[in-house]
Amino acid sequence: MPTAIVTGAARELVRALAAAGWSVVTTARDPATGKPLPDSAINTPGARETVVVPGDITEPAHRDRLIAAADARGGAALVVHDIGAPDPPGVLACLPVPALRVAFERAVTAPFALTQLALPALRHHRGAVVTITSGSASGICLAAVEQLGKVLSREEPAVRVWLARVGGGVSPRSSRCWHRTG
């Protein structure tokens, strides 16, 4: 049974992966409070191989726990980052630097660090990394997420990398989806 790590706890995605026979290791935050969700808030009925690891992926120890849970199930063949709208609201020129740091940590740095930890298993399984963002996002964090994915796809030929922008209407910019198969 392949194993997926899903951050952001896209419940429908977790359910679909479990129904398709995947073992799923997942984690999420409450969008209203920003606090980690407990397993009871994420658990998917009928999914025997869904493991919820409550916590915050901005914390290195939590990322280690996610990798350990995936490794106990054979290692991640898929990493999905559901980061929603990654950018802080407002005009960049007026954005407080601390708010930008927090946004980068949550949307760019932490998912990247988790992906780095998962790379040995992803290479072994010839796996994939999928980053899902909101179609309404169009700012600096999204640009960083896109660029990291493009570089990763060039540097890791054994790993497929996709970026999916969902919702927020369809435009040439928001409907674009790139990938490179390994």
Image: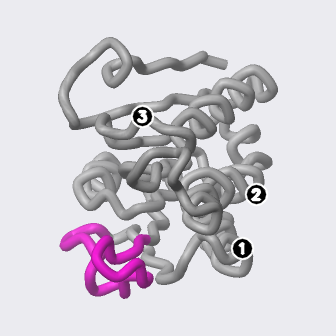
**Residue at the (71%, 73%) spot, across then down:** 64
Q: What amino acid type should be assigned to the residue bearing mark 1?
A: Asp
Q: What residue is disc 2 on?
A: 117
Q: Secondary structure at mark 2?
A: helix
Q: Earlier in the sequence, mark 2 or mark 1?
A: 1
The location of residue 74, given as percent across then percent down, is: 64, 59
**Residue at the (22%, 37%) spot, across then down:** 167
Find residue 45 and report its image quarter: bottom left
Query: Which portion, as a residue range, is magenta?
Result: 28-47
Indicate which disc residue 85 carries. none
Q: What residue is disc 3 on?
A: 138
Q: Is residue 111 left or right of residue 162?
A: right
Q: Secondary structure at mark 1?
A: helix
Instruction: Give the CA distance from mark 3 to mark 1.
Output: 30 Å
Instruction: Give the CA distance from mark 3 to mark 2.
Output: 27 Å
Q: What amino acid type should be assigned to the residue bearing mark 3?
A: Ser
Residue sitting nearer the eye, 58 or 85: 85
Q: Is residue 27 left or right of residue 105?
A: left
Q: CB of mark 2 within 8 Å of CB of mark 1? A: yes
The location of residue 168, given as percent across then percent down, is: 22, 35
Q: Secondary structure at mark 3?
A: loop
Residue farthest top in this picture: 172
Find residue 49 and report its image quarter: bottom left
Foreground tag (3 vs 2) = 3
- Where is 34 relative to 50, above or below? below
Q: What residue is disc 1 on?
A: 64
The location of residue 22, given as percent across then percent down, is: 41, 52
- Where is 146 relative to 44, above or below? above
